[in-house]
């Protein structure tokens, strides 16, 4: 066991519910593998078992098995404040609302049967303040009726893993299967019968923004981290948001001649070639394919062609005319509406034949998660948000805001770029993160802290805990 790392599994037990023996055994498997600690945060809830005329409530009861792990005060664990003394109603839909300043600078963890994650803006810290709820360790029982049914539907079995190291505290949710009680962390599935490697279906990268991608992060992610998590890269898809920044001629810079002084001579073609180079990395690091989400920064190239005058931009006039012609030639009329191909796709198809690069059209799902939506456009054309996507009748993974988040089956990845000048003003909730969809159908959000999302020795511990059949 690595003594320099404190590992903690935190989950939530609701009173008057049914114990989930298999999940408890899976947690025990993790504790045995890591030498970690268990913390249980308890929530009070009891059913009305009276008549329609006279209410009568059950006595509060808990599963005594985990009595010794219960935290009923506040405890600081690394950079987190864990609230064992706050009882958030298990039926509330917004368990984190109103707690923004409770951490006094520390990240916060609350016990609740939903798994939510919010990133609150901070000033000058380089990372947000994270607010998390745990997820449940029991089979939650609620009153019959709309409130109880909604609460039951939104229960997520699981917990939070904290790893406290000298260089910082790493954290991630794990999401358990409600039937088997198994959960997957970093490509390893923990079950009552032991630890096995888990296949991966897809890795969704936080917004990339070439040429501002964080090369150091990418080298770590694809050189060290993902080879540990993903043992089947040839079967695993990559999904990319905002692959192009389009800083060269982005409409955000239009009519700002002083701010953008010096950009006049910059070549759009050079910037697009960098996207080409990024995607052309040898078979994109050995993964199956790269799927590009229709995103607002990529669409800025189309807008430039549509709205700007080639005669005023001699450096880029030829490319603009060339792409405009290609767009016109690619236009087809479908059901009386013009249908065009994205300018970025037209450019890339002309540069090299990216057989493993796919521009997502329509729906694309991995493990039940819709991954085709960037997040900028919400329902019926309105502005998108984590909350608006949570109304969809599907789980989804989105990007766009550059802030990591989770809410009722929707995961929002942050970014994988270098810091931006425009985000340095005022408070920021940006963070670097990715999401991994496993063969179990569950997804895990991995948020980076100084380009790391796990303590260094974790993979060694998981490897050692592998059951028979994993001789490596
Ligand atoms: Fe973005």
Image (spheres, helix red, strand yellow):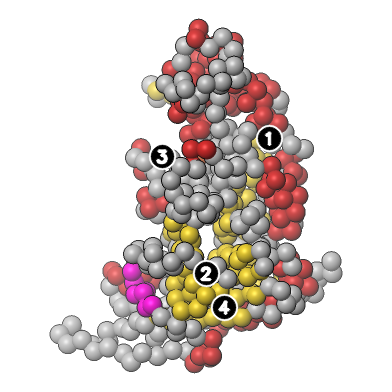
Q: Earlier in the sequence, mark 4 or mark 1?
A: 4
Which labelled disc corresponds to residue 279?
1
Q: Are marks 1 and 2 in contact (CB under 8 Å)?
A: no
Residue denoted by label 3: 377
The mark closer to the camera, 1 or 2, is 2
Residue 290 screen position, x and y as percent: 65, 40
Q: CA distance from mark 1 to mark 2?
A: 37 Å
In magenta stretch: residue 281: no
Which mark sits nearer the N-terminus, 3 or 1?
A: 1
Of label 1 and label 2, which has the lower sequence position? 2
Which residue does the numbered mark 4 point to in the structure image?
23
Q: In 3D space, how far apart are the residues under numbered discs 4 and 1 (Cα atoms)? A: 40 Å
Residue for point 35% across, 37% down: 381
Q: Could you tell me which quadrant the N terminus lies in?
A: bottom right
Left or right, 233 with respect to 88, comes to right
Q: Residues within 10 Å of mark 2 (few under 14, many from 20)?
A: many
Residue 216 is left or right of residue 139, and the answer is: right
Residue 436 versus residue 10 in the image, above or below: above
Q: Which mark is first along the chain, 4 or 3?
A: 4
């Amino acid at each position: 066991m690595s003594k320099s790392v404190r590992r903690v599994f935190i989950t939530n037990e609701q009173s008057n519910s049914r114990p989930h023996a298999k999940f408890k055994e899976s947690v025990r498997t993790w504790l045995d593998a890591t030498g970690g600690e268990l913390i249980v945060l308890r929530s009070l809830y009891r059913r009305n078992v009276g008549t329609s005329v006279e209410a009568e409530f059950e006595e509060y009861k808990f599963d005594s098995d985990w009595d010794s792990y219960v935290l009923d005060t506040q405890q600081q664990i690394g950079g987190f404040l864990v609230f064992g003394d706050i009882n958030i109603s298990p039926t509330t839909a917004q368990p984190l609302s109103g707690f923004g300043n409770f951490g006094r600078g520390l990240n916060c963890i609350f016990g609740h049967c939903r798994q939510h994650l919010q990133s609150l803006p901070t000033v000058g810290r380089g990372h947000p303040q994270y607010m998390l709820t745990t997820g449940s360790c029991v089979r939650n029982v609620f009153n019959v009726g709309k409130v109880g049914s909604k609460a039951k539907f939104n229960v997520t079995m699981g917990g939070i893993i904290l790893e406290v190291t000298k260089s910082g505290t790493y954290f991630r949710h794990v999401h358990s299967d409600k039937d088997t009680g198994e959960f997957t962390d970093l490509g390893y599935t923990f079950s009552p019968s032991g630890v096995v490697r888990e296949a991966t279906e897809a890795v969704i990268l936080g917004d990339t923004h070439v040429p501002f991608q964080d090369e150091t992060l990418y080298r770590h992610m694809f050189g060290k981290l993902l080879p540990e998590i993903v043992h089947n890269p040839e079967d695993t898809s990559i999904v990319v948001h905002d692959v192009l920044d389009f800083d060269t001629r982005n409409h955000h810079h239009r009519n700002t001649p002083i701010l953008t002084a010096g950009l006049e001579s910059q070549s759009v073609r050079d910037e697009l070639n960098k996207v080409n180079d990024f995607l052309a990395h040898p078979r994109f690091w050995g993964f199956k394919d790269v799927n590009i989400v229709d995103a607002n920064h990529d669409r800025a190239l189309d807008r430039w062609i549509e709205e700007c005058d080639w005669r005023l931009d001699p450096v880029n006039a030829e490319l603009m005319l060339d792409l405009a012609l290609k767009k016109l030639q690619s236009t087809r009329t479908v059901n009386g509406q013009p249908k065009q191909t994205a300018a970025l796709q037209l450019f890339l198809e002309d540069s090299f034949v990216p057989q493993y690069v796919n521009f997502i059209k329509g729906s694309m799902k991995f493990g039940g998660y819709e991954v085709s939506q960037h997040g900028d456009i919400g329902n019926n054309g309105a502005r998108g948000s984590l909350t608006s996507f949570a109304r969809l009748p599907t789980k989804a993974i989105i990007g766009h805001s550059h802030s990591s988040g989770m809410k009722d089956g929707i995961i929002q990845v942050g970014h994988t770029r270098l810091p931006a000048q425009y985000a340095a003003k005022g408070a920021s909730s940006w963070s670097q993160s990715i999401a991994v969809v496993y063969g179990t159908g569950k997804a895990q959000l991995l948020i980076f802290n100084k380009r790391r999302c796990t303590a260094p020795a974790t993979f060694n511990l998981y490897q050692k805990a592998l059951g028979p059949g994993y001789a490596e």
